Amino acid sequence: MTPPAETTPIELELREELARLRALLPERIDLDPADLERGLAGLVLTLVEFLRQVLERQAIRRMEGGTLSDDEVERVGLALMRLQEKIREIAEQFGLDEDDIQLRIGAAS
Amino acid sequence: MTLLLRAIVAAADAGIAADVGLRAVSGKSVAALASPWNGTSAASEAELLDHHRTVQAVFEHVPCLPARFGSVFADEEAIRARLAERDSDFASQLARLGHRCELAITCAWRGEGAIPPAVLAPATTGRAYLERGLQRSRGEREREGRAEEIVAHLLGELAVEPAFVRHRTCPRPAVAVSMSALVTRDEIDEITSRLERVGAQLPDVTIVVQGPWAPYTFAVSE
Protein backbone atom coordinates (compact mmCIF):
# COMPACT_ATOMS: atom_id res chain seq x y z
CA MET A 1 0.00 0.00 0.00
CA THR A 2 1.30 3.45 -0.87
CA PRO A 3 1.80 5.61 2.23
CA PRO A 4 -0.24 8.83 2.19
CA ALA A 5 1.74 11.68 0.67
CA GLU A 6 2.65 14.54 2.99
CA THR A 7 0.11 17.37 2.88
CA THR A 8 1.55 20.35 1.08
CA PRO A 9 0.87 23.94 2.22
CA ILE A 10 -1.23 24.46 -0.94
CA GLU A 11 -3.40 21.43 -0.06
CA LEU A 12 -3.80 22.70 3.48
CA GLU A 13 -4.81 26.09 2.19
CA LEU A 14 -7.31 24.56 -0.24
CA ARG A 15 -8.81 22.52 2.59
CA GLU A 16 -9.21 25.67 4.66
CA GLU A 17 -10.85 27.42 1.71
CA LEU A 18 -13.22 24.47 1.24
CA ALA A 19 -14.15 24.60 4.92
CA ARG A 20 -14.94 28.29 4.51
CA LEU A 21 -16.94 27.54 1.39
CA ARG A 22 -18.94 24.88 3.25
CA ALA A 23 -19.79 27.45 5.93
CA LEU A 24 -21.02 29.83 3.24
CA LEU A 25 -23.65 27.48 1.89
CA PRO A 26 -26.98 27.65 3.69
CA GLU A 27 -28.32 24.41 5.16
CA ARG A 28 -31.48 24.95 3.19
CA ILE A 29 -32.57 27.45 0.55
CA ASP A 30 -35.65 29.49 1.23
CA LEU A 31 -37.83 28.99 -1.84
CA ASP A 32 -40.03 32.03 -1.43
CA PRO A 33 -41.41 32.48 -5.00
CA ALA A 34 -41.43 36.26 -4.68
CA ASP A 35 -37.77 36.40 -3.78
CA LEU A 36 -36.42 33.25 -5.39
CA GLU A 37 -34.39 34.87 -8.15
CA ARG A 38 -32.82 37.40 -5.83
CA GLY A 39 -32.00 34.74 -3.24
CA LEU A 40 -30.38 32.45 -5.78
CA ALA A 41 -28.51 35.34 -7.38
CA GLY A 42 -27.15 36.29 -3.96
CA LEU A 43 -26.00 32.74 -3.33
CA VAL A 44 -24.37 32.34 -6.75
CA LEU A 45 -22.68 35.74 -6.57
CA THR A 46 -21.36 34.95 -3.09
CA LEU A 47 -19.82 31.74 -4.39
CA VAL A 48 -18.30 33.45 -7.43
CA GLU A 49 -16.92 36.28 -5.27
CA PHE A 50 -15.52 33.74 -2.84
CA LEU A 51 -13.69 31.93 -5.67
CA ARG A 52 -12.51 35.26 -7.06
CA GLN A 53 -11.00 36.12 -3.68
CA VAL A 54 -9.26 32.72 -3.49
CA LEU A 55 -7.75 33.26 -6.95
CA GLU A 56 -6.76 36.81 -6.06
CA ARG A 57 -4.93 35.65 -2.94
CA GLN A 58 -3.07 33.01 -4.97
CA ALA A 59 -2.15 35.57 -7.64
CA ILE A 60 -0.92 38.07 -5.06
CA ARG A 61 1.18 35.42 -3.37
CA ARG A 62 2.73 34.40 -6.68
CA MET A 63 3.37 38.03 -7.63
CA GLU A 64 5.01 38.60 -4.24
CA GLY A 65 7.08 35.43 -4.71
CA GLY A 66 8.20 36.59 -8.15
CA THR A 67 6.82 33.55 -9.99
CA LEU A 68 4.60 35.54 -12.36
CA SER A 69 6.01 37.37 -15.39
CA ASP A 70 5.08 41.03 -15.95
CA ASP A 71 2.71 39.96 -18.68
CA GLU A 72 1.03 37.37 -16.44
CA VAL A 73 0.65 39.89 -13.61
CA GLU A 74 -1.11 42.27 -15.97
CA ARG A 75 -3.37 39.61 -17.50
CA VAL A 76 -4.36 37.94 -14.21
CA GLY A 77 -4.87 41.30 -12.48
CA LEU A 78 -7.04 42.57 -15.30
CA ALA A 79 -9.15 39.40 -15.35
CA LEU A 80 -9.73 39.56 -11.59
CA MET A 81 -10.51 43.27 -11.73
CA ARG A 82 -13.07 42.78 -14.52
CA LEU A 83 -14.64 39.83 -12.73
CA GLN A 84 -15.06 42.00 -9.63
CA GLU A 85 -16.69 44.73 -11.72
CA LYS A 86 -19.03 42.18 -13.31
CA ILE A 87 -20.05 40.80 -9.90
CA ARG A 88 -20.88 44.33 -8.73
CA GLU A 89 -22.88 44.97 -11.90
CA ILE A 90 -24.95 41.78 -11.60
CA ALA A 91 -25.47 42.35 -7.87
CA GLU A 92 -26.83 45.79 -8.67
CA GLN A 93 -29.21 44.35 -11.28
CA PHE A 94 -30.69 42.07 -8.62
CA GLY A 95 -30.91 44.86 -6.09
CA LEU A 96 -28.19 43.26 -3.97
CA ASP A 97 -25.74 45.19 -1.91
CA GLU A 98 -22.11 44.21 -2.42
CA ASP A 99 -21.68 44.54 1.34
CA ASP A 100 -24.19 41.71 1.86
CA ILE A 101 -22.04 39.41 -0.23
CA GLN A 102 -18.85 40.47 1.54
CA LEU A 103 -20.54 40.07 4.93
CA ARG A 104 -21.66 36.56 4.05
CA ILE A 105 -18.10 35.65 3.10
CA GLY A 106 -16.73 37.40 6.17
CA ALA A 107 -19.09 35.50 8.45
CA ALA A 108 -17.76 32.21 7.10
CA SER A 109 -14.10 33.18 7.65
CA MET B 1 -47.28 23.81 20.68
CA THR B 2 -43.50 23.44 20.44
CA LEU B 3 -41.15 24.52 23.20
CA LEU B 4 -38.15 26.82 22.97
CA LEU B 5 -35.31 25.82 25.27
CA ARG B 6 -34.00 28.75 27.32
CA ALA B 7 -31.54 27.23 29.78
CA ILE B 8 -30.45 24.12 31.65
CA VAL B 9 -30.28 24.27 35.45
CA ALA B 10 -29.68 21.76 38.24
CA ALA B 11 -32.80 19.68 38.97
CA ALA B 12 -32.76 21.14 42.49
CA ASP B 13 -33.09 24.65 40.99
CA ALA B 14 -36.04 23.84 38.71
CA GLY B 15 -38.34 25.85 40.96
CA ILE B 16 -36.90 29.06 39.50
CA ALA B 17 -39.01 28.42 36.38
CA ALA B 18 -42.17 29.78 38.01
CA ASP B 19 -40.40 32.97 39.14
CA VAL B 20 -39.24 33.82 35.62
CA GLY B 21 -42.35 32.69 33.73
CA LEU B 22 -40.91 29.51 32.23
CA ARG B 23 -41.88 25.85 32.15
CA ALA B 24 -39.54 23.34 33.83
CA VAL B 25 -38.97 19.85 32.46
CA SER B 26 -36.99 17.81 34.95
CA GLY B 27 -34.51 15.05 34.25
CA LYS B 28 -32.34 13.02 36.62
CA SER B 29 -29.80 15.66 37.71
CA VAL B 30 -30.73 18.62 35.54
CA ALA B 31 -33.86 20.43 34.39
CA ALA B 32 -34.63 22.29 31.18
CA LEU B 33 -36.35 25.66 31.31
CA ALA B 34 -38.42 26.37 28.24
CA SER B 35 -41.27 28.48 26.98
CA PRO B 36 -44.05 27.82 24.47
CA TRP B 37 -42.99 28.74 20.96
CA ASN B 38 -45.00 29.35 17.86
CA GLY B 39 -42.94 27.31 15.41
CA THR B 40 -44.08 29.28 12.40
CA SER B 41 -42.82 32.68 13.47
CA ALA B 42 -39.47 33.78 12.11
CA ALA B 43 -36.90 34.86 14.68
CA SER B 44 -36.77 38.61 14.98
CA GLU B 45 -34.32 40.85 16.79
CA ALA B 46 -36.94 41.43 19.50
CA GLU B 47 -37.21 37.68 20.08
CA LEU B 48 -33.44 37.33 20.31
CA LEU B 49 -33.28 40.12 22.88
CA ASP B 50 -36.16 38.58 24.78
CA HIS B 51 -34.27 35.26 24.83
CA HIS B 52 -31.20 37.01 26.22
CA ARG B 53 -33.27 38.76 28.90
CA THR B 54 -34.95 35.50 29.87
CA VAL B 55 -31.64 33.65 30.17
CA GLN B 56 -30.20 36.56 32.13
CA ALA B 57 -33.13 36.45 34.57
CA VAL B 58 -32.45 32.76 35.22
CA PHE B 59 -28.71 33.37 35.49
CA GLU B 60 -29.20 36.11 38.09
CA HIS B 61 -30.84 33.57 40.40
CA VAL B 62 -29.20 30.19 39.81
CA PRO B 63 -26.25 28.69 37.90
CA CYS B 64 -27.31 27.78 34.37
CA LEU B 65 -26.21 26.72 30.92
CA PRO B 66 -27.78 29.16 28.46
CA ALA B 67 -29.37 27.66 25.36
CA ARG B 68 -28.50 29.06 21.96
CA PHE B 69 -31.55 30.80 20.54
CA GLY B 70 -33.49 28.44 18.27
CA SER B 71 -33.30 25.15 20.21
CA VAL B 72 -36.89 24.10 19.59
CA PHE B 73 -38.45 20.82 20.78
CA ALA B 74 -41.71 19.20 19.69
CA ASP B 75 -42.98 18.81 23.27
CA GLU B 76 -41.97 18.10 26.88
CA GLU B 77 -41.36 14.46 26.03
CA ALA B 78 -38.75 15.43 23.42
CA ILE B 79 -36.97 17.60 25.98
CA ARG B 80 -37.09 14.81 28.53
CA ALA B 81 -35.53 12.43 25.99
CA ARG B 82 -32.72 14.93 25.31
CA LEU B 83 -32.10 15.39 29.04
CA ALA B 84 -31.92 11.61 29.50
CA GLU B 85 -29.31 11.39 26.71
CA ARG B 86 -27.16 14.24 27.97
CA ASP B 87 -27.79 14.22 31.73
CA SER B 88 -24.23 13.55 32.88
CA ASP B 89 -22.75 15.94 30.31
CA PHE B 90 -25.10 18.76 31.32
CA ALA B 91 -24.47 18.08 35.00
CA SER B 92 -20.71 18.22 34.56
CA GLN B 93 -20.91 21.40 32.44
CA LEU B 94 -23.11 23.00 35.09
CA ALA B 95 -20.62 22.11 37.82
CA ARG B 96 -17.72 23.50 35.76
CA LEU B 97 -19.32 26.58 34.17
CA GLY B 98 -22.65 27.31 35.82
CA HIS B 99 -21.36 29.54 38.59
CA ARG B 100 -19.09 31.53 36.25
CA CYS B 101 -19.95 34.63 34.23
CA GLU B 102 -18.86 35.44 30.73
CA LEU B 103 -17.17 38.75 30.00
CA ALA B 104 -16.91 39.86 26.38
CA ILE B 105 -13.71 41.81 25.77
CA THR B 106 -13.47 43.66 22.49
CA CYS B 107 -10.33 45.49 21.36
CA ALA B 108 -11.32 47.93 18.62
CA TRP B 109 -8.65 49.50 16.44
CA ARG B 110 -8.09 53.19 16.93
CA GLY B 111 -7.50 55.44 13.91
CA GLU B 112 -4.55 54.09 11.92
CA GLY B 113 -5.20 50.47 12.80
CA ALA B 114 -8.55 50.33 11.04
CA ILE B 115 -8.65 49.36 7.37
CA PRO B 116 -9.57 52.34 5.20
CA PRO B 117 -10.78 50.70 1.95
CA ALA B 118 -12.45 53.85 0.69
CA VAL B 119 -9.19 55.83 0.47
CA LEU B 120 -7.66 53.40 -2.03
CA ALA B 121 -7.94 54.76 -5.56
CA PRO B 122 -9.54 52.39 -8.08
CA ALA B 123 -6.96 50.47 -10.08
CA THR B 124 -6.68 51.13 -13.80
CA THR B 125 -4.28 48.34 -14.81
CA GLY B 126 -4.04 44.67 -13.90
CA ARG B 127 -0.73 45.23 -12.11
CA ALA B 128 -2.11 48.17 -10.12
CA TYR B 129 -5.07 46.02 -9.12
CA LEU B 130 -2.87 43.20 -7.79
CA GLU B 131 -0.49 45.65 -6.12
CA ARG B 132 -3.40 47.21 -4.32
CA GLY B 133 -4.36 43.71 -3.17
CA LEU B 134 -0.78 43.08 -2.06
CA GLN B 135 -0.79 46.31 -0.06
CA ARG B 136 -4.07 45.29 1.58
CA SER B 137 -2.77 41.80 2.27
CA ARG B 138 0.40 43.16 3.94
CA GLY B 139 -1.72 45.49 6.05
CA GLU B 140 -3.88 42.56 7.14
CA ARG B 141 -0.83 40.48 8.08
CA GLU B 142 0.58 43.37 10.12
CA ARG B 143 -2.72 43.83 11.93
CA GLU B 144 -2.97 40.07 12.53
CA GLY B 145 0.53 40.07 14.05
CA ARG B 146 -0.28 43.05 16.25
CA ALA B 147 -3.57 41.46 17.32
CA GLU B 148 -1.67 38.33 18.41
CA GLU B 149 0.60 40.53 20.56
CA ILE B 150 -2.45 42.13 22.14
CA VAL B 151 -3.92 38.68 22.86
CA ALA B 152 -0.68 37.64 24.58
CA HIS B 153 -0.77 40.84 26.65
CA LEU B 154 -4.41 40.33 27.62
CA LEU B 155 -3.93 36.68 28.54
CA GLY B 156 -1.01 37.64 30.76
CA GLU B 157 -3.10 40.27 32.51
CA LEU B 158 -6.23 38.17 32.85
CA ALA B 159 -4.41 35.18 34.32
CA VAL B 160 -7.51 33.08 33.75
CA GLU B 161 -7.31 29.32 33.20
CA PRO B 162 -6.77 28.75 29.42
CA ALA B 163 -9.91 26.60 29.19
CA PHE B 164 -11.91 29.63 30.32
CA VAL B 165 -10.74 32.00 27.58
CA ARG B 166 -11.56 32.01 23.88
CA HIS B 167 -10.55 34.57 21.33
CA ARG B 168 -10.53 35.53 17.66
CA THR B 169 -8.09 37.94 16.10
CA CYS B 170 -9.27 40.47 13.49
CA PRO B 171 -12.81 39.04 13.21
CA ARG B 172 -14.01 42.26 11.58
CA PRO B 173 -12.13 45.17 9.97
CA ALA B 174 -12.63 47.46 12.97
CA VAL B 175 -11.85 44.84 15.61
CA ALA B 176 -8.38 43.61 16.61
CA VAL B 177 -9.42 41.03 19.19
CA SER B 178 -12.71 39.58 20.32
CA MET B 179 -12.28 37.60 23.52
CA SER B 180 -14.61 35.81 25.89
CA ALA B 181 -13.47 35.03 29.42
CA LEU B 182 -15.21 33.06 32.12
CA VAL B 183 -14.73 34.53 35.56
CA THR B 184 -16.35 34.20 38.94
CA ARG B 185 -18.64 36.99 40.08
CA ASP B 186 -16.19 38.21 42.72
CA GLU B 187 -13.44 38.57 40.10
CA ILE B 188 -15.41 40.87 37.80
CA ASP B 189 -14.46 44.25 39.33
CA GLU B 190 -10.78 43.40 39.65
CA ILE B 191 -10.54 42.04 36.11
CA THR B 192 -12.45 44.97 34.65
CA SER B 193 -10.14 47.49 36.29
CA ARG B 194 -7.10 45.48 35.21
CA LEU B 195 -8.39 45.60 31.63
CA GLU B 196 -8.92 49.35 31.92
CA ARG B 197 -5.27 49.72 32.97
CA VAL B 198 -4.16 47.57 30.03
CA GLY B 199 -6.33 49.66 27.70
CA ALA B 200 -4.55 52.81 28.84
CA GLN B 201 -1.18 51.22 27.93
CA LEU B 202 -2.17 50.18 24.43
CA PRO B 203 -2.08 53.13 22.05
CA ASP B 204 -3.66 51.43 19.05
CA VAL B 205 -6.81 49.84 20.49
CA THR B 206 -9.76 50.74 22.68
CA ILE B 207 -10.86 47.99 25.06
CA VAL B 208 -14.56 47.54 25.71
CA VAL B 209 -15.74 45.05 28.35
CA GLN B 210 -19.35 43.83 28.25
CA GLY B 211 -21.20 41.50 30.58
CA PRO B 212 -21.37 39.70 32.88
CA TRP B 213 -23.51 37.24 30.96
CA ALA B 214 -24.38 33.59 31.27
CA PRO B 215 -21.61 31.45 29.74
CA TYR B 216 -22.98 31.43 26.17
CA THR B 217 -19.66 30.85 24.44
CA PHE B 218 -18.60 27.97 26.64
CA ALA B 219 -21.80 26.02 27.30
CA VAL B 220 -23.06 23.36 24.90
CA SER B 221 -26.71 22.92 25.77
CA GLU B 222 -27.99 21.64 22.40
Image (cartoon, grey):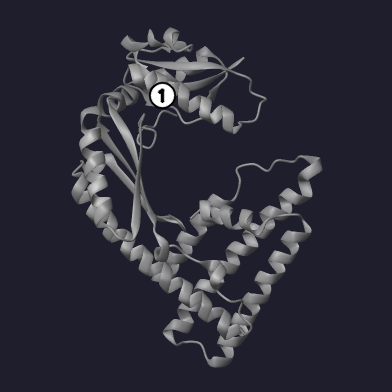
Residue visible at 36% across and 22% down?
B59
Residue at left 32%, top 17%? Answer: B62
Q: Position of residue B163 (x, y in %)?
A: 25, 41
- Label 1 marks a residue whose chain is B
x then y, percent, for residue A77: 59, 81
Dot 1 crowding, Cα within 10 Å, few <14, some 14–19, many 20+:
some
The relative height of residue A9 versus residue B7 in the rendered view (above or below) is below
Q: Quadrant of residue A70?
A: bottom right
| Nearer to me, B21 or A83 | B21
Quadrant location, the N terminus of chain A? bottom left
Q: Which residue sits at x=34%, y=24%?
A: B90
Residue sitting at 45 percent across and 29 percent down? B222
Disc 1 residue type? Gln
Residue B86 in view: yes
Secondary structure beneath dot 1 equals helix
The residue singled out by tag 1 in the image is B56
